[in-house]
Image (spheres, helix red, strand yellow):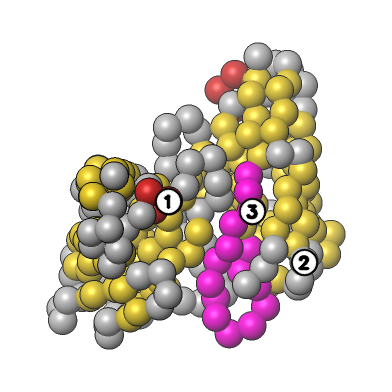
Amino acid sequence: DAKTTQPTSMDCAEGRAANLPCNHSTISGNEYVYWYRQIHSQGPQYIIHGLKNNETNEMASLIITEDRKSSTLILPHATLRDTAVYYCIVRVRQAGTALIFGKGTTLSVSS
Amino acid sequence: SAVISQKPSRDICQRGTSLTIQCQVDSQVTMMFWYRQQPGQSLTLIATANQGSEATYESGFVIDKFPISRPNLTFSTLTVSNMSPEDSSIYLCSVIPAGPSYEQYFGPGTRLTVT
């Protein structure tokens, strides 16, 4: 079973921030939070990951709560091209550990 | 990162036949994986392709149905054997490049339709 819980779907207006929540209440101390997205008919794309500190890169920001039981992926200025399925995955960061996907959140960005 | 190519990109096959999907990476990788994505569903891990030895299969997947080879650090094949319409899916190759990052990257996928 997936170790994360995400809403099935979300809508966002173009240009606004998209905030995608994820619950991972059973996360272990050595597990990282990863976010990937899958645009229709393409392979999943890495977005960002974190352990306990907030992280930011050119694509998104990741906010992890202090107890690490939940996190939020933020796309600061959503565009139509951000329409995709977003997957939140917890994983030990070591060789040999494959990503296990849950159902993800379908984000629809509209103009 | 790693650039991953898969062949074929798509195929339509008749039931009872087999299809071999190739995965080629542009750099050496430590780990290679194969996933299946059935229509409208999330990705499911099929197996870990081990270099020079038998693949490690996840529960529900067997070698006779999905034989896998990995002859070197940059190439792997997945065969879907004795296909039925239920095998219609996207099959994705995924890798973890050599180095300290442990990030996992995905190929573009092979869209298989079985009639």
**Which residue lies at the image location 29% right of the left edge and 44% below the top edge?**
A111
Is the stretch drawn in magenta largely helix, strand or loop? loop
Q: Earlier in the sequence, mark 3 or mark 2?
A: 2
Check chain identity for marks 2 and 1: say if they share one.
no
Q: Which mark is residue A81?
A: 1
Query: What are the residue bounds of the magenta stretch?
Result: B95-109
Q: Position of residue B58 (x, y in %)?
A: 54, 49
Q: Residues within 10 Å of mark 2 (few under 14, many from 20)?
A: few
Q: Position of residue A34 (x, y in %)?
A: 38, 67
Judge whether residue B110 is colored magenta.
no
**Which residue lies at the image location 58% right of the left edge and 63% below the top edge?**
B105
Using the image, determine if residue B3 lies above or below residue A28.
above
Judge whether residue B102 is colored magenta.
yes
Residue B111 visible in the shown view: yes
**What amino acid is at disc 1?**
Arg
Q: Nearer the viewer, residue B8 or B60?
A: B8
Q: Position of residue B47 (x, y in %)?
A: 60, 51
Q: Position of residue B43 (x, y in %)?
A: 48, 45
Q: Chain of mark 1?
A: A
Distance Cα–Cα, label 3 vs label 1 = 19 Å
Mark 2 or 1: in front is 1
Q: Secondary structure at mark 3?
A: loop
Task: From the image, tell me which residue sits under label 3.
Answer: B107
Q: Secondary structure at mark 2?
A: loop
Q: Is residue A103 left or right of residue B15?
A: left
Q: Is residue B26 left or right of residue A100?
A: right
Task: From the image, tell me which residue sits under label 2.
Answer: B26
